[in-house]
Image (tube, rainbow, N blue to C red):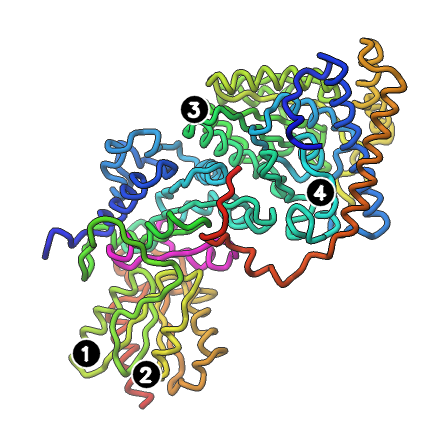
C-alpha cells in the first residue's frame, strides 16, 4: 500500500472509498496489536504509545490529503504514519531496531518520518510538531506549492506554549495549515476536565482568530468531512482551522501505565464506540459493503501485517558503525526535501 | 582606511543580501528585523530591498519563530532566524535542541534542516544578566548543531555565507560589541565562503599559543601588540567554529611554543574552553607542554549591570597581558 492511494475522498462516497477507510483502520489496529505482541514477547525494547481506539481520526484526516500534503505527528503516531501511506515493513523494522527500519534503528517508534508520503515525522516532544507544521505551511505559501500541512497533536499539547505560538503565527500569516487535535481525554494521566476550563478544545482557536470545529473522532466520515472543509479553506488561502476529534485510547499511555486515573467501566464504555465496528455498521446500513467484504478486508490487513513483521524480522540489526557519520548531512549527498 | 573596512553589521548584511540574491529559498525571520532594521541594525535596509515576505517580521515568539524556521527548512527553504539577544534562545530551546539538532539523525537521514540561527551575544552594553550571556557552550554540547563565532567583519561575512550553504542547523553567535566596529582587514566585495571547521592562525609568535573566540580574539590581538613591545611573542588562534572544532593548528603551534592559554567570555565552569584544554592534555600535544595550561574566562556569575562590575566579570585586554606575561616568565 503506497501513498499513491492517498486523497481518496469521502469514506462513504463509494464502495472503494469505504473499503479503503476500513482497510486503513484495520491495518492500524492490526499493526499496533502486533507491536504490543512483539513488546510483550520481549522482541521490542524502549516504549510504545498505542493509538488503538483512535484509528478513525488518522484515517479520516489523511483521506482528505494529497500525497504532497505534509503532516507532523506525535509520540502516538503509528496511525498517522500508516494512514499517510507509510510502508509497514519499514515501520516494524524500525521498532525492532533493524537497519532496514525507517530510521535505521536510530529513532524508534517516536521518530518515524517518511519523506515520500510527506510525513515530517512523529515527535517525542508534546507540541513539538506544531510549529514545524506551521513552518512547512509557510514554505508552501512562499514557494507557491499549493500544499497543506496538517499537525496532529493531542489534547495535552494544547497547553504547551508551542501550540499558542504556532497558532498565532499560522493565523497572522494565513498559512495553509490544519491543526488536528486528537482529544483522547487524557494527557498521560491528567484528564482534560482538570487541564482545561473551556467546554471544547476547538474554542482555543477563538483567541487567535482561528475557527474551530469539534467532531466525533471515532466517526471516520465525520472526521473526513471536517478535515476536508478545513483543507479547502487552507488551500483557498483563508488560513488555519482547528479540528478537534473527540476520541479515546483503549490502551494505557505507554507501557508503564497502570490505568489508575480512569475506570474499567469508562474504558469499556468507549470500547462500545469502537471506530471500526461503528464504521462497519454504517457501511452495512448504506449497502456499501457486506459481511463477506468486511471480513475480507480484515483478513487482508492481518495478512499485510504478518507479512510486514516477517519481512522486518529478516533485517539485520542496526549497525553502530554508521552513527557518527549520521549526525550531520554532508553537503555533497543528495538533496532531499519533503 | 578604504571603503571596504566594513563593520560586522555591514558585513553580515552583505552576506545575507548575497545569499538572498543567489537563492530564492533564503529568507530572514525575526523580531523587528523589517522596517526597524533589527535591534542592532544588522538587517538594515534589507526589508526595502527584498520585501516583507523574505525579510519577515515576527511577533515576539521565539519558540514559534524557530519552529517555523525548522518546518520551512524541512520543506525546501533556507531560513535565517535572527534572535534579538542570544539569551532569548532559552525561549526556543525545544525547537533548537530537540528538533533542529536531531531530526536528520533520528529520522534516519531522510530529512535535514538547513537553518541558520543568528543571535546577538555577549556583554559590554550595560544590558545586565538577561541580555549579555555567552551561551555558545550550551549548543556545542548538542550533537547535530554547528556553532560559529565570528571574530571580525571579514570572518562574519565568509562564515555566514558558508553557514547558509550548510545543510545543517548552524548557531551563529555575534558579539554585540563587534557590530559597530571595523576589523583589521578589508571585507572583500562579492561572495566568498570560509569553510566551517577550519581554525585560523592570526599571528605567530614563539612564546605562547592563545586560543580565543569571538570578541576575545580582538582582545588577544591587542594584548599581543602590547606584549610584542616587551619581547613576548604570542600565537593567536581563532577556531571560528567551536563545533566542529579544528584542533590541528593548536597542536602544531604547541610544538613550537609549549605554552597554552585559552580565553573566552563565557563563565569558566563547564565552558567550551575546557574542551580545548581537554583535547590538548589527552591528545598529541601533552608532551609538547612546558607550562601548566592557563585559562581566562568569565567569572562564574550572572553578568552584572554597573560598568565597572560588568567589566570585571569578563576578561579584558589587560587581563590577557598580565596572564600571558606571567606564564612566559614563570615557565622558561
Q: Residue at x 69, y 56 (%)?
A: A318
Binning the other alpha carbons within 10 Å of mark 2 as few (below 14), some (14 to 19) or many (20 upward) gives many
Which one is in front in this view, the residue at disc 2 or the one at disc 4? 4
Q: Residues within 10 Å of mark 4 (few under 14, many from 20)?
A: many
For residue B299: magenta?
A: no
Say which label, 2 or 1, has the lower sequence index: 1
Q: Nearer the viewer, residue B70 or A100?
A: A100
**Residue topped by disc 1:** B228
Helix or strand or loop: what does disc 4 sit on? Answer: helix
**Mark whose residue sits in front, 2 or 3:** 2
Is A67 placed left or right of A185 in the picture? left
Label 1 neighbour load within 10 Å: few <14, some 14-19, many 20+: few
SS for dot 3: helix
Q: Secondary structure at mark 2?
A: helix
Please name the residue shown 23% across and 69% down the image.
Answer: B221
Q: Nearer the viewer, mark 1 or mark 4?
A: 4
Q: Which residue is mark 3?
A: A172
Q: Which residue matches tag 2?
A: B257
Residue under pointer 4: A91
Quadrant of the image for the N terminus of chain A? top right
Amino acid at each position: 500500500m503506497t501513498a499513491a492511494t492517498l486523497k481518496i475522498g469521502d469514506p462513504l462516497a463509494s464502495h472503494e472509498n469505504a473499503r479503503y477507510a476500513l482497510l486503513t483502520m484495520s491495518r492500524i489496529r492490526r499493526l499496533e496489536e502486533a507491536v504490543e505482541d512483539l513488546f510483550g514477547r520481549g522482541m521490542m525494547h524502549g516504549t510504545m504509545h498505542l493509538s488503538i481506539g483512535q484509528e478513525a481520526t488518522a484515517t479520516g484526516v489523511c483521506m482528505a490529503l494529497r500525497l504532497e500534503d505534509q503532516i507532523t505527528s506525535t509520540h502516538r503516531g503509528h496511525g498517522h504514519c500508516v494512514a499517510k501511506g507509510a510502508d509497514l515493513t519499514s515501520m516494524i523494522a524500525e521498532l525492532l531496531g533493524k537497519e532496514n527500519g525507517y530510521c535505521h534503528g536510530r529513532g524508534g517508534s517516536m521518530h518515524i518520518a517518511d519523506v515520500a508520503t510527506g510525513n515530517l515525522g512523529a515527535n517525542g516532544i508534546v507540541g513539538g510538531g506544531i510549529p514545524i507544521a506551521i513552518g512547512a505551511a509557510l514554505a508552501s505559501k512562499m514557494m507557491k506549492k499549493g500544499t497543506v500541512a496538517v499537525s496532529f497533536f493531542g489534547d495535552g499539547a494544547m497547553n504547551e506554549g508551542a501550540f499558542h505560538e504556532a497558532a498565532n503565527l499560522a493565523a497572522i500569516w494565513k498559512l495553509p495549515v490544519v491543526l488536528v487535535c486528537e482529544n483522547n481525554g487524557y494527557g498521560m494521566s491528567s484528564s482534560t476536565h482538570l487541564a482545561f476550563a473551556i467546554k471544547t478544545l476547538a474554542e482555543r482557536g477563538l483567541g487567535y482568530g482561528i475557527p474551530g470545529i469539534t467532531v466525533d473522532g471515532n466517526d471516520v466520515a465525520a472526521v473526513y468531512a471536517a478535515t476536508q472543509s478545513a483543507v479547502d479553506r487552507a488551500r483557498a488561502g483563508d488560513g488555519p482551522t482547528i479540528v478537534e476529534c473527540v476520541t479515546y485510547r483503549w490502551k494505557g499511555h505507554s507501557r508503564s501505565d497502570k490505568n489508575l486515573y480512569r475506570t474499567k467501566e469508562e474504558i469499556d464504555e468507549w470500547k462500545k464506540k469502537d471506530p471500526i465496528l461503528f464504521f462497519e455498521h454504517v457501511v452495512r446500513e448504506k449497502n456499501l459493503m457486506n459481511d463477506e467484504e468486511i471480513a475480507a478486508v480484515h483478513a487482508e490487513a492481518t495478512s499485510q501485517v504478518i507479512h510486514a513483521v516477517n519481512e522486518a524480522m529478516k533485517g539485520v540489526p542496526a549497525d553502530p558503525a554508521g552513527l557518527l557519520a549520521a549526525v550531520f548531512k554532508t553537503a555533497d549527498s543528495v538533496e532531499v526535501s519533503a | 582606511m578604504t571603503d571596504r573596512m566594513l563593520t560586522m553589521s555591514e558585513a553580515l548584511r552583505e552576506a545575507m543580501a548575497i545569499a538572498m540574491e543567489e537563492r530564492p529559498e533564503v529568507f530572514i525571520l525575526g523580531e523587528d528585523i523589517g522596517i526597524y532594521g533589527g535591534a542592532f541594525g544588522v538587517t538594515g535596509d534589507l526589508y526595502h530591498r527584498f520585501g516583507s515576505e523574505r525579510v519577515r517580521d515576527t511577533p515576539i515568539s521565539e519558540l514559534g519563530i524557530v519552529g517555523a524556521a525548522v518546518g520551512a527548512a524541512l520543506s525546501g527553504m533556507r531560513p535565517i532566524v535572527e534572535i534579538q539577544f542570544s539569551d532569548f534562545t532559552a525561549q526556543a530551546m525545544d525547537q533548537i535542541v530537540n528538533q533542529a539538532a536531531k531530526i536528520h539523525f533520528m529520522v534516519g537521514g531522510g530529512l535535514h534542516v538547513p537553518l541558520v540561527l543568528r543571535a546577538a551575544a555577549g556583554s559590554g552594553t550595560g544590558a545586565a544578566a538577561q541580555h549579555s550571556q555567552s551561551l555558545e557552550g550550551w549548543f556545542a554540547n548538542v550533537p547535530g548543531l554547528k556553532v560559529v563565532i565570528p571574530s571580525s567583519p571579514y570572518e562574519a561575512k565568509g562564515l555566514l555565507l558558508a553557514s547558509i550553504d550548510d545543510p545543517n542547523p548552524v548557531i551563529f553567535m555575534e558579539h554585540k560589541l563587534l557590530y559597530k566596529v571595523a576589523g583589521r582587514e578589508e571585507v572583500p566585495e562579492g561572495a566568498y565562503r570560509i569553510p566551517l571547521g577550519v581554525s585560523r592562525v592570526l599571528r605567530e609568535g614563539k612564546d605562547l599559543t592563545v586560543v580565543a573566540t569571538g570578541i576575545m580574539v580582538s582582545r588577544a590581538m591587542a594584548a599581543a601588540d602590547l606584549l610584542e613591545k616587551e619581547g613576548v611573542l604570542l600565537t593567536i588562534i581563532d577556531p571560528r567554529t567551536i563545533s566542529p572544532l579544528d584542533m590541528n593548528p593548536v597542536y602544531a603551534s604547541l610544538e613550537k611554543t609549549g605554552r597554552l592559554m585559552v580565553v573566552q567570555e563565557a563563565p569558566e565552569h563547564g565552558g567550551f574552553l575546557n574542551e580545548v584544554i581537554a583535547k590538548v592534555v589527552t591528545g598529541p600535544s601533552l608532551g609538547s607542554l612546558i607550562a601548566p595550561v592557563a585559562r581566562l574566562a568569565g567569572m562564574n556569575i550572572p553578568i552584572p549591570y554597573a560598568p565597572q562590575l560588568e567589566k570585571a566579570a569578563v576578561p579584558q585586554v589587560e587581563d590577557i597581558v598580565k596572564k600571558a606575561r606571567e606564564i612566559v616568565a614563570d615557565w622558561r
